[in-house]
Amino acid sequence: MRKMSTCFLSLLLLSTGLFAQESQPLSAQLNKVKLEFKLDEAGRPVYQVDYAGKKAIKPSVMGFELANDAAFAKDFVITSSQKSAHDDSWKPVWGEVSSIRDHYEQLTVHLKQKNAPFRLLDIVFRVFEDGVGFRYTFPKQKDLKHFVVSKELTEFNQTGDHKAFWIPGDYDTNEYKYTTSTLSAVDAWVVKDKATDIVVRVVPDQHSVATPLMLKTSDGLYINIHEAALVNYPAMQLHVDTKNFGMSASLVPDATGNKAYLYAPFSTPWRTIIVSDKATDILSSKMILNLNEPSKLATTDWIKPMKFMGVWWELQIGKSGWNYADSQDTLDAKGQLIPNGKHGGNTANVKHYIDFAAKNGIQGLLVEGWNVGWEDWFGSWKENVFDFTTPYPDFDVKAISDYAKSKGVSMIMHNETSGAATTYERYLDTAFKFMNTYNYPAVKTGYVGKIIPRGEHHDGQWMINHYQRVAQKAADHHVMLDSHESNRPTGLHRTFPNWMASEAGRGNEYNAFSDGNPPDHETIMPFTRFMGGPMDYTPGIFKLKGYAAAAPDRQVHTTLAKQLALYVTLYSPLQMAADLPENYDAHQDAFQFIKDVATDWDDTKVVEAEPGDYISTARKAKGTSNWFIGAITDENSRVTNIPLTFLDKGKKYIATIYGDAATTDWQKNPEAYVITKVVVTQATVLNLKLASGGGAAVSVYPATAAEASKYKAYKK
Amino acid sequence: MRKMSTCFLSLLLLSTGLFAQESQPLSAQLNKVKLEFKLDEAGRPVYQVDYAGKKAIKPSVMGFELANDAAFAKDFVITSSQKSAHDDSWKPVWGEVSSIRDHYEQLTVHLKQKNAPFRLLDIVFRVFEDGVGFRYTFPKQKDLKHFVVSKELTEFNQTGDHKAFWIPGDYDTNEYKYTTSTLSAVDAWVVKDKATDIVVRVVPDQHSVATPLMLKTSDGLYINIHEAALVNYPAMQLHVDTKNFGMSASLVPDATGNKAYLYAPFSTPWRTIIVSDKATDILSSKMILNLNEPSKLATTDWIKPMKFMGVWWELQIGKSGWNYADSQDTLDAKGQLIPNGKHGGNTANVKHYIDFAAKNGIQGLLVEGWNVGWEDWFGSWKENVFDFTTPYPDFDVKAISDYAKSKGVSMIMHNETSGAATTYERYLDTAFKFMNTYNYPAVKTGYVGKIIPRGEHHDGQWMINHYQRVAQKAADHHVMLDSHESNRPTGLHRTFPNWMASEAGRGNEYNAFSDGNPPDHETIMPFTRFMGGPMDYTPGIFKLKGYAAAAPDRQVHTTLAKQLALYVTLYSPLQMAADLPENYDAHQDAFQFIKDVATDWDDTKVVEAEPGDYISTARKAKGTSNWFIGAITDENSRVTNIPLTFLDKGKKYIATIYGDAATTDWQKNPEAYVITKVVVTQATVLNLKLASGGGAAVSVYPATAAEASKYKAYKK
């Protein structure tokens, strides 16, 4: 006890004293955001961030420890520094807006160690209007070629016991429910131990959290910590000092405990601190995308955002199965698998989905369980499961490919690796050639289970490189990528615009096979998981109760209108209509919103937002004058007011409002909704009533003269 | 101290008591070799081996421990057992003899555990005239599907403090010098610490040795312990109980400490105990080959044993280099590597070797350092080094391929992986297609350095599977394989007859870059490393002193005649003529033996042998009446008498004897030799005088009438 007190005191002294004992710091500022940098008396790099004169990040040290080598953490001197300004804009291949402004002040600091071998380290800060990004660069230098990072020392010290929206710092999964607590209450092990619905959980540090981490201070500052351009480096998690509210980088290790194998010159991923006094600014931030490199693809005209359906939800809810036979040992006299009659990915069923998708203008169709191996794919750390090209006997890939083509539907390949990345790499060329042969323009990859190479983790350097290799290979074959159970994104879809989406978070699927996602889940995800890039969340469940054969009482924790709103709230250029055809046929009026909603946008307005409570978003569909609005709330019903100021002045629009009914309640009456069609203008303020666990979706398009006279003007 | 004494006593009691407390054992016997099996009172499987009524292996337990599971080691009952006899023969695609007799008594024991889940384990013993092989089979059973071996318990308990010829039980290398000591004196760490010429050394157990382990008892029994058919399982090493002379299996672990990931039904590799009172029987044993599965290749007519030269020794001795530039950072203004002018694998030099090989009837040519990446390939656990298809600018692969073809020389590809097996697997298809495109019928692979997947070892299950994948891929492309730094062989060349040779031992190359191999080295290797299969030892060095630029005093620890003898002593169907063309041109008379000697044999007679001292071998070249004899000795000069009883009765032969001169001595005068051509018959007994570190090579072919009259009859 005495020891701990001493430690506590010395840390406090350290934290407050860091900036006090040295000369004037270097600084850079853009509007309200100010960055200061200096070396402390031990020659350690230290930075801090202010927002509007308030401390956002307290003095925090920077640096590294290398394996079997001298520390790269102190005894530095500043040899020089430069400042520069940058302001331009660029156009993403697809996204939430058509043009992105990249506006920052840059401070580059060149450091050198005082003692032999006089090593060099550069730190580059970029100060944006909405935060700070910084990265380390190990310059080319005589005595540093290959090196191994054993620890990154970067701190993100907080000014108080902020409210945090967090999941555990797990090496292998991001699929936890979010916990909302103060920093002092962070206990990753309690959460991990409860999360029995997640297959692989590895959380060595009890006080660790994953990024993107969303924080809110007691005086109303919103702070988001993550990273950008995670390339050839492990994912950064954060160790939380629950006493002093300090946080420090915690890199996911490899099988031997090392973190990163590098070669100078090398630049680390950017560490990002987005900060504002408005929650909507956090969601609107393009800082992470700006910190990524431009597209490295030669052509991008083959990249086409789309909606898709799947022989998928019926597998998740147990209506049919991935596997063709009950077990790999269920063989007939000829040694062939004996079918169990419950296989979802069969030709007839797939054609049924193709018909439905074609009829309803849904462009894509995913089929899982199409290939041999699902009888024994899971949970055994088994290396040779799938070969990615051998269909089950009842899946006629040629016939299906031809039929889909004749109907104008794009097939989406499914490559589940069961975590055996080594096996997938062995077959990668063959797998992508197979997709080209059978006209699959997109692939969903999966990494369920413990990783092979055994001892590696989903979020370690080797796997980070693997995911990128797959994205590159997909690009080489003009295939779009949707990676599941991969690392959470860090804006790399700017560099690889064919890497459309990742899962890497707790998607709607948990409502199928576990106790699901709580009503506030989707109000937190845009502030956390989505900060780095699109997620294949799979919204659009209409049958919200009684869908799971094995658990009749199971239900999705939203209303039907909220499921529609998610198509706007949760951005993905590959967006699923996840429910079964028959459930959409039962609500074709509501399904119209899914048919209409875009997957690529010219503009986005986050109208109002509070993490854990609500989000209202309006987006303008690419190349049109149509807007789509999504508003969601948590377990509390609320009213959201949405001024349609973004509409063209003087024009009339038809707004179709898909709202919760007066009696709607996510628990008792989730599937009740009301559809209203009205005339709106730029002056309209929509007043949308969201039920408990509810939402509202609105489509807005220019009215024809006939429509303008047919429908009534909107009234609150 | 007290604790250790107690432990010692109880172990002694255990060892002697095992067989005393149970009923009559099961047994199988063939000639002098007798195997007995029973369960001890704890229900543990126990076996023992006798030879000619003498104990060869004392009672030794068998079994496994599984990870996160009940032990698989005791509480067994015997449910049934079968005995059967087998006697037939088969023809290898190539080898030391043209036909191999497979003659054994088989005892199969079916075991079941007394308690739930009543698991099953079978043990299959095969008793040959020259020893015992046994394997475990995990039958298909309800409660054992996927399982993980954490420990194999198999013991090989010795009757006394035998003389052992051993190298450390290293997870990553077999390239140690052999130590000859008693079992009680085994200290692997002392050897490991001294072996600074080996790159990667990992020896966690101080009292561990590798197999094949050669033992000699004080009463003249020779015992060899190894394994056969190592498939989907880690290599077995042996932990030595230096007090009681017990030995137990020690499997090479993966990155997480597990040993093998298996699925029932599964059969382990065979554990082999070869035993005889004649050392020559050990060398003649075909037990390990017999315990391997027959060839699984559809065709084998493309597999052609051959001799080859290489742009290789000149790299090893520093005459030229693998790398094209001095460093990967040595770039010109266009970013291209600046050549250092010392690159051996250049088109002109390669053509020079092709000319020499063609002129001298050497079929193959290896070129190392032909491909981009050698500036930074080594020692940094670097993953992306080579792509296996990009030549250096001065290596014109098309021109070289065409030139070699025009001269009738086969190019041998070199695929060094620098231990990055993951990278090699990624490029494997492409690499082998490249070989097909450019007419390379063989490939030498290399695994220098720490393995990637990081944390895996050269001899663990994952890499064992990798080597086999490469062998299979090579077979698919009709390419012969010579794998270096891979696992020591276990007879798998029967199953994959395109897997011609491995290194996996301390080859002649150590004489180029280190203090080399002691004079007794090649008298031990046939009893150890070669027991599992051919080695690419690279004999044939003629310039035995003053060859190494960096170390003028360095010398090979043999005489020139012994280098010739090694072509017979050390069998490989890919056999190198390792020295430089100019060194062969300086001794064209001696080089004649290398030009003449075969690489595939109809018959082999081991005339006399003693591990660590001497070996004399005679072999009959495939499809001819020609014999070749090799006799070698250690540091002691000796005389070997070789009765030519294997020659056809009544025929006259010309024997060309390449022997040490009277003044020859490996240290002082190694390159002196005498060539004698004489007439011999079946009645001749060659009396060959071998110098210290010396040897003699003899070619014997039927004499024409002219030759029979021209040359004198052999006289002692």
Image (cartoon, coloured by chain):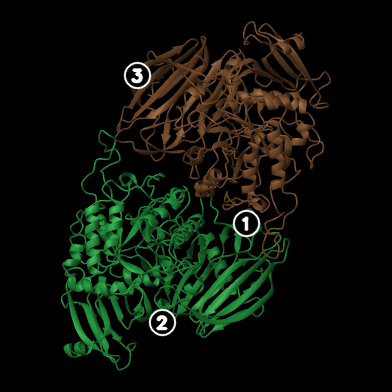
Chain colours: A brown, B green
Evaluate whether residue A217 shows in this view: no
- Please tell me whether mark 2 or mark 3 is closer to you in this view: 3
Residue type (three-letter) at the residue carrying disc 2: Lys
> Crowding at label 3, few (<14), some or many (≥20) Cα neighbours within 10 Å?
some
The relative height of residue A382 versus residue B482 in the rendered view (above or below) is above
- Give neighbour class at mark 1: few <14, some 14-19, many 20+ (Cα, 10 Å): some
Which residue is identified by label 1? B147
Find disc 2 in the rendering and name its residue. B278
Q: Quadrant of the C terminus of chain B?
A: bottom left
- Camera-side residue: A62 or A109? A109
Q: Residue at x 26, y 63 (%)?
A: B407
Please state which amino acid type lies under the numbered disc 3.
Ser
Picture disc at residue A81: 3
Residue in front for this viewpoint, B639 or B467: B467
- Amino acid on which the number 1 mark rests in the picture: Phe
First in sequence, mark 1 or 2: give its number: 1
**Secondary structure found at label 2:** loop
Mark 3 and mark 2 in contact (Cβ < 8 Å)? Answer: no
**Chain identifier of the residue bearing label 2 in the image:** B
Chain ID at mark 1: B
Q: B378 or B185, which lies in front?
A: B378
Please provide percent x and percent y for residue B530. 39, 69
**Given this view, does label 1 or label 2 mark the residue nearer the observer?**
1
Where does residue B670 sit, x and y in percent of width and height?
Answer: 19, 70
